[in-house]
Image (tube, rainbow, N blue to C red):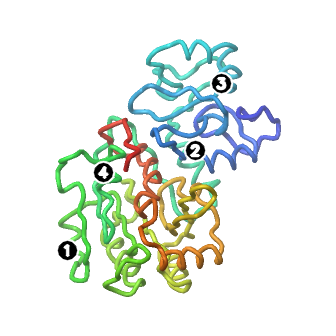
């Protein structure tokens, strides 16, 4: 039986808890598992990946949530009310014992989750196994062209005044060679972007893509290494269609579009290629007419867009909490 909706049309096994999962629930789970809200907690129930009212795990190292319906159905009726009345409730993946009513945590669920994603997700990119909290280390970042220090600091991945070796920012990499990257590294996250629309470019737009890809190869772990390694390249609508096709071929994944929408008006948008989980769930299509309109608006705009490119993709980094240490659970929304 599907433990998410009760259907008897079981398609696969739930990766976190004992029980089955139907095909529609499997698809929803893949789309929503790594989506996070601005408060740093996951957006949907860790059992059914839906639910309106959620119980949030209060373990500071956990970000998971559970809906009232799943908890009352699988644990016991009335459990959600009891949990609401508790202080410092820890969830079913954090508790020391594996069973709560009918809900039983899978043994080695992190391995199950990786196998589930690799088998079921329509992605050519492999998912890394999530890291237990006691093994998480601070993230080491190589930031190319665009600087994401503010965004990562506001999310708690970097400390204010932290070791400068944690983030290496480079504007010009023309003379950077493999030996340089290896001496500065190893890195866990490589970020790069084209200049924002309307900003002067020191190089042709395609240069930023090719240089990012070159340094990405230098920074990658050796083949077969289990060490989590993530990357993201952001195009601020300056690449040509041919350049974007080349990016898709070189980076081996399709781009997604992330938009800055205010009062149903698209103020800004970026194309993003990345292997970070759930980036593909954070997009909506940007038709060519809308992209042309944004380019025209930029030529007429007296002030920059409401959100800069790095701010647009900021919340896409939240799934990295499953892999790396973070220093603050209070996210700053002002950035």
3D distance between C-alphas at marks 2 and 4: 22 Å
3D distance between C-alphas at marks 1 and 4: 21 Å
- Earlier sequence position, callout 3 versus callout 4: 3
Q: Are marks 2 and 1 in contact (CB under 8 Å)?
A: no
x, y percent for residue 37: 51, 42
x, y percent for residue 20: 71, 37
Q: Are marks 1 and 3 in contact (CB under 8 Å)?
A: no
- Specify the farthest residue to the front: 302
Q: Are marks 1 and 4 in contact (CB under 8 Å)?
A: no
Crowdedness near tag 2: few (<14), some (14–19) or many (≥20) residues, C-alpha within 10 Å: many
> Which of the two marks, 2 or 1, is nearer to us in this view?
2
Q: Which residue is mark 1?
A: 179
3D distance between C-alphas at marks 3 and 4: 34 Å
Q: Which residue is mark 4?
A: 139
Q: Which residue is mark 3?
A: 68
Q: Which residue is mark 2?
A: 33
């Amino acid at each position: 039986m599907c433990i998410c909706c009760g259907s008897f049309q079981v398609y696969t096994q739930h990766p976190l808890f004992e029980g089955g999962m139907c095909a529609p629930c499997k698809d929803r789970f893949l789309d929503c598992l790594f989506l996070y809200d601005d408060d740093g907690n996951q957006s949907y129930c860790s059992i059914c990946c839906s639910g309106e009212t959620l119980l949030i795990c209060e373990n500071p190292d956990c970000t998971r949530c559970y809906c009232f319906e799943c908890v009352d159905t699988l644990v016991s009726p009335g459990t959600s009310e009891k949990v609401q009345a508790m202080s410092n409730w820890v969830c079913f993946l954090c508790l020391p014992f594996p069973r709560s009513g009918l809900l039983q945590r899978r043994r080695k669920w992190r391995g199950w989750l990786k196998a589930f994603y690799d088998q079921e997700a329509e992605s050519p990119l492999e998912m890394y196994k999530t890291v237990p909290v006691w093994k998480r280390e601070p993230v080491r970042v190589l930031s190319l062209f665009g600087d994401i220090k503010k965004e990562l600091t506001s999310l708690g991945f970097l400390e204010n005044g932290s070791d400068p070796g944690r983030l290496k920012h480079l504007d010009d990499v023309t003379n950077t060679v493999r030996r340089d990257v290896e001496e500065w590294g190893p890195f866990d996250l490589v970020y790069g972007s084209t200049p924002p629309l309307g900003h002067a470019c020191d190089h042709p737009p395609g240069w930023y893509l090719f240089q990012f890809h070159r340094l990405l190869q230098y920074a990658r772990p050796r083949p077969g290494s289990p060490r989590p390694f993530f990357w993201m390249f952001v195009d601020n609508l300056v690449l040509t269609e041919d350049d974007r096709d080349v990016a898709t071929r070189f980076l081996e994944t399709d781009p997604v579009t992330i938009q800055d929408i205010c009062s149903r008006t698209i103020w800004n948008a970026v194309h993003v290629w990345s292997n970070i989980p759930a980036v593909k769930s954070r997009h909506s299509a940007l038709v060519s007419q809308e992209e042309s309109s944004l380019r025209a608006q930029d030529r007429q705009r007296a002030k920059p867009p409401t959100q800069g490119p790095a701010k647009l993709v900021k919340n896409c980094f939240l799934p990295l909490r499953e892999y790396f240490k973070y220093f603050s659970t209070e996210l700053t929304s002002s950035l």
